[in-house]
Image (spheres, rainbow, N blue to C red):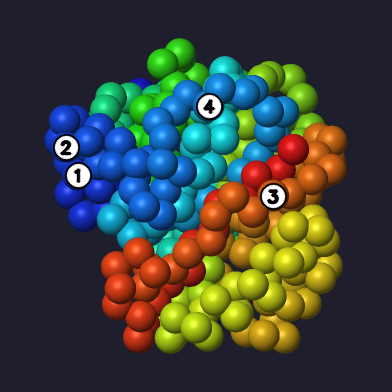
């Protein structure tokens, strides 16, 4: 069995178990975090979330809102979708089998579901190499390991092609396979990149608005018209479409902040949002 070893441990998050658990705890209790530790007391009918994928010291507190929201769920499967920053491998790639390793242990890829989504959409290829270097999915897994004590599997999907048509196809394919298991969807994206803090807030507010309306057409229009530099826009759109197909009627912004808000360095920031679909 192939093992997907950590690519960004020691950079985006600590590379030892004790330090990593402490860092995740700090994200939940941070001034920009939810201010409380999971599990959540209420079991909302959450179908999916959007959360960031930067280093935990920057985006972890914002991501913690999404993870707190889903912490009382007991999914058998977590589908994680994110952008392929390196542009290596296939245009759209899931993994057929293997283990994802983090300092907190191993999580198994759901082979049956991977084969099924490949049957539903042949454009979603099954490829290990596409996943070997990127951080967008990797940084989600320790968070999942920390909030869930039960055994769960993952289906990682990484995107080079983030076009509207691709997002629509992926979202609909995910909705078909997600009906067969207790599933939660995690769409991974950061928002505006390397702009001044006030401008980033303005740009991201414009893009978050159609997300909260779950309007994918408007989302792509705003993305292009305003030239918003959100890296995982296809992952966001895929998640919206899948959640709508699965019955989501409401999107809620749990938290928005930039790296500048968190660190105080506001000249060149990256935007982060935690959004839940229910």
How far apart in space, not on screen, are marks 4 and 1 (Cα)? 25 Å
Percent position (x, y) of residue 268?
A: 36, 82
Q: Nearer the viewer, residue 99 or 22?
A: 22
Question: Which residue lies at the image location 16% right of the left edge and 37% below the top edge?
Answer: 19
Q: Earlier in the sequence, mark 3 or mark 4?
A: 4
* Quadrant, the C terminus: top right
Per the image, label 3 sits on a secondary structure element best described as: strand
Label 3, on which residue? 252
Percent position (x, y) of residue 30?
A: 34, 48
Q: For the residue carrying disc 1, how many other residues have a C-alpha within 10 Å: few (<14), some (14-19), or many (20+)?
A: some
Q: Is residue 222 above or below residue 237?
A: below
Q: Which mark is residue 97?
A: none
Looking at the image, residue 88 sits to the left or right of residue 244; the answer is: left
Q: For the residue carrying disc 4, how many other residues have a C-alpha within 10 Å: few (<14), some (14-19), or many (20+)?
A: some
Percent position (x, y) of residue 81?
A: 56, 47
Label 2, on which residue? 19
Q: Which mark is residue 40?
A: 4
Label 1, on which residue? 14
Of badges 1 and 3, the one in the foreground is: 3
Per the image, label 2 sits on a secondary structure element best described as: helix
Percent position (x, y) of residue 18?
A: 16, 30
Q: Earlier in the sequence, mark 2 or mark 4?
A: 2
Per the image, label 1 sits on a secondary structure element best described as: loop
Of badges 2 and 4, the one in the foreground is: 4
Q: Quadrant of residue 179?
A: top right
Q: Are marks 2 and 1 in contact (CB under 8 Å)?
A: yes
Of badges 4 and 1, the one in the foreground is: 4
Q: Is residue 236 above or below residue 172?
A: below
Q: Nearer the viewer, residue 268 or 239?
A: 268
């Amino acid at each position: 069995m192939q093992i997907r070893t950590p690519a960004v441990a020691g950079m985006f998050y600590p590379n030892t178990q004790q330090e990593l658990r402490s860092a995740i705890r700090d994200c939940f209790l941070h001034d920009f975090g939810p201010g409380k530790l999971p599990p959540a007391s209420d079991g909302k009918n959450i179908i999916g979330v959007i959360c960031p994928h930067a280093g935990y010291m920057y985006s972890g507190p914002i991501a913690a809102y999404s993870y707190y929201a889903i912490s009382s769920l007991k999914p058998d499967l977590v589908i994680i979708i994110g952008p392929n920053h390196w542009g290596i491998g296939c245009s759209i790639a899931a993994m057929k089998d293997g283990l994802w390793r983090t300092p907190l242990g191993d999580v198994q890829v759901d082979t049956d579901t991977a084969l099924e989504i490949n049957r539903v959409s042949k454009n979603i290829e099954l490829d290990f190499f596409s996943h070997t270097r990127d951080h967008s999915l990797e940084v989600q897994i320790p968070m999942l390991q920390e909030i869930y004590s039960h055994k769960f599997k993952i289906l990682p999907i990484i995107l080079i092609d983030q076009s509207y048509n691709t997002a629509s196809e992926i979202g609909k394919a995910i909705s078909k396979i997600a009906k067969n298991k207790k599933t939660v969807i995690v769409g991974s994206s950061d928002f505006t990149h390397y702009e001044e803090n006030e401008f980033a807030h303005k740009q991201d507010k414009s893009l978050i608005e159609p997300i909260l309306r779950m309007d994918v057409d408007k989302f792509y229009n705003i993305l292009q018209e305003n030239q918003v530099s959100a890296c995982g826009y296809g992952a966001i759109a895929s998640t919206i479409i899948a959640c709508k197909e699965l019955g989501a009627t409401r999107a809620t912004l749990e938290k928005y902040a930039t790296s500048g808000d968190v660190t105080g360095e506001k000249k060149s920031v990256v935007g982060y949002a935690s959004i839940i679909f229910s």
